[in-house]
Amino acid sequence: MPKTLETRAEEHFERRSALRVLFLFDPDEDHREAIRTWDHPEIECIEATQPGLSTIYHIEKQGADANVLLYTPRRRPTTADLSSYPLADLLIANAELTVDEAAELADERDLRPEQRRLVQQYYDSDLRYKNRRRFLGSTLSRERLTEDRLKRGLAAYYLDLFGAAAPSSTNHVIAGVFIRARDEEGFADYQEACAARDLDDWLGQQMAQRFALDRVAFSHEMVKTAAKRLKYNLLTQPLDTVSADDPYRTTLRVEQTSVLTRMRDLVNEWDAHNRLSPSYQQVLDTLAPEVDEARLMQAYGSEASFGYLTPALRRERLRQAVALLPEQPETSQQTVQSLRSSDDQAAAEAAHVVWHMAAFYRHVNAHATLDVGALDAFVDTYTTDLYRCDTHYREAVRIMQTIRREQSTYRSVIDDAYESFLHAYADQFVQAMNIPWQQKLEAEAASQPIRDALRIPPLDQFYTRYVASVEKKTAVIISDGLRYEVAAALDNALQSTRRKHTTLDATLAPIPSITSLGKACLLPHHTLALDADAAGIQVDGTTANSTRQRSKLLKAGRSDAEVFRFDDLNGLTTDEGRARMKEHSLVYIYHDRIDRYGDKADTETDTPTAAYETVSELQGFIQKLNNWNVRRVLITADHGFLYDDSVPDAMQEPFPPTTRADGTEGYVVRRNRCVVADAVAAEHGYQFEVPAVSPLTDDWQAVVPRAVNRYNLSGAGKRYAHGGASLQELVVPVLEVETTRTDIAEKVDVRLLTSKNTILSGVLKAEFLQMQSISNTVRPRTIQVGLYDDQDALISNSEKLEMDVVAPDDPGQRTHTCLLELMPQADDLNACHLRAHDIEDTLNPIIDQPFTIQRHFGSDF
């Protein structure tokens, strides 16, 4: 620590016993604060703002033996000034206190002579200030202080990007220079501060070395030139050849491996530093617009494996993918696959929308017709494949809602294709599938009960099939409106969870597919009846609308059973949850998110998000139940739903005339997708006798509007609907999740897809395929990938890849890519091996592939 003024003054008086007055001249008032807080028992501090007789009197008043520090906030008088200086005699007879803080700092740090010269050189401009010394930290130590490190630290300080501590790498400073250069006026201030400290020459030297520039003065133009060279080489380095049509090949291309390596090191360190923002991609886009991606795409093709995707390249990739819809959906998905993991969130969101639209078209295009034949064929086709069309539609809509809300710059690229997609979903899928399904369902129900005509079990057999005979502690989660495809998404999410075995079945909801009837079907019962006056359901003669009523009915089937609301359990601790579950071998838990949002006109557009959140919410809750010692969980629903984000007016129609048993106008149930009454006007919609399509025995008629139309129900929305007879409304999931105590799954297999066994320009883009989707029997694997020489020494960066994707029907989603860049120690090698190890077994590679190393680009001119 620097000495205080009190200590310095005391040392002067101790060295010179005859000294009485010690002068301190302070024209800049650097010591004003120290004088204000002066505290020494034996040395009196006197301030002489205007030295004169009063000052002399005040000194003499202290006594002949007193020691006085005379503080004068003005410059020391020159020799010529002494004749007129009132205190000249005192000054000549005594001494002046001078403060050499630079020397004291060097002493304190025990610096060597060459280090002391650096401190003296930079003390007045920087090192005198505590905040700068604190920023430089250990750089000012005997072990670390060099001219290069000191200049690096000071250059970093004036960037004002790194908080309270200097960065540890010159690459961090260079990255900061690029970031600061986005503001030319602010950069001029930075350049001026550096020039005043002789840092500009050091910065110019660093830039020239890293980017193979001719030595020129450090300037904004130099930084822009470096940015152009960096952007171009990062984009083109992974390419196999140089095109004759490349307009930048003679001015910007770098061939020296060492320079290319330094460039890659720079951006890697930039990415890794949490204070270097924005990203190098964004900064280079600002500083180097002259490197025109459109011209590079013309030279190499837009599908070329560029080192990274600039905004222009991302936009072009999206345009290409959109142009491939709907005829070439597989290629469209491949085109945007890498964009889905882009750091540019807006681009990633747009890519997700395009990818889901393409996936929808891929599934629809795989079927020559959606009139697949018999009723069982409809159910089988929907539950094994076509339900995914609903999932991809729901996800595309959910993400597009975000894009529109955030006013994404990529919206204009995909808007037209998205509108066409909405119409295709309604016309080519929902109606194309459900019109023949409902026609055949109506015809079959006219001759026999549907439960006798279909293999799929009815929902009212749920308790008998899945609960009654099972002695294992079981939790049944009844999620209102959880249609089959959402349960399938939950099943996929659970596949990557170790020690969980899942089975997804389907049941058929009754018509009308309404909440009260669906929930009653899930309880143990002998008879179900619809209360025509209260529009409620009676189970074995008891009303079953409230939690307490359902609890009573459930206990009739199993005495130690209990009913809970999801919200009453979700916040419990592990101990509280175990205590709540301990006394019950069976619990029913009622969850409501999808229907809560969908069934209200003012929130129905939130249905896609509600379904998405339901998956993550239930996944987490299932784990809680496991922690509460419930190892068997069933997830089911009361009904499904239809959702169309753009229902036209033509799909809205009035209710048909209906009458009660006494002939008066009236109805038993009215929803936007069905009406139940004693009699309905003929030739309207799809008509069913209620006992043929439900467990109810009342002699009523249920009518569903044609196609997937909605009735004009006051206060109801038109996007979200249920109650009718579409597959989306009727096919109800039963997802069984059992947690095992041991993990019997094998790790996923991995294959190297990269076909060319040559490394050009020091960089290899390696692509791997995760061979299987993660499931109950296949668990994830983490691999470490790198390039090695014949002595098993690592000669590139090492990358970690997580093989953990759940995508049973889409290998494209299971591809993983990384860039491996040769380090300088590989400069003399002409061959190496790519090796991939499981991180739990670093001795035995699962992939060992030889590669040839070529040092320069090839050429096609």
Image: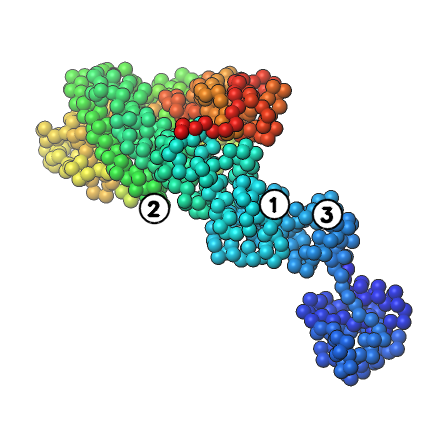
Q: Earlier in the sequence, mark 1 or mark 3?
A: 3
From mark 1 to mark 3, how far is it between C-alphas? 16 Å
Position of the C terminus, as image quadrant, is top left
Does residue 497 show up? no
From mark 2 to mark 3, how far is it between C-alphas? 52 Å
Q: Callout 2: helix, strand or loop?
A: loop
Residue tagged 3: 141
Q: Earlier in the sequence, mark 2 or mark 3?
A: 3
**Which dot marks residue 407?**
2
Displayed quadrant of residue 813 = top left
Question: Which residue appears at 39% of the width and 41% of the height?
Answer: 292
Above or below — where is 64 with respect to 309?
below
Residue 616 placement (x, y as % from top left): 42, 33
Above or below — where is 674 with respect to 380?
below
In the rendered structure, the answer to whether residue 632 lies left or right of residue 395 reads right
In the rendered structure, the answer to whether residue 53 lies left or right of residue 173 reads right
Residue 569 placement (x, y as % from top left): 46, 35
Q: Residues within 10 Å of mark 2 (few under 14, many from 20)?
A: few
Q: Residues within 10 Å of mark 3 (few under 14, many from 20)?
A: some
Amino acid tagged 1 = Pro
In the foreground, 861 or 637: 861
Amino acid tagged 3 = Ser
Question: Which residue appears at 58% of the width and 28% of the height?
Answer: 827
Q: Earlier in the sequence, mark 1 or mark 2?
A: 1
Question: Which residue appears at 69% of the width and 66% of the height?
Answer: 30
Residue tagged 1: 167
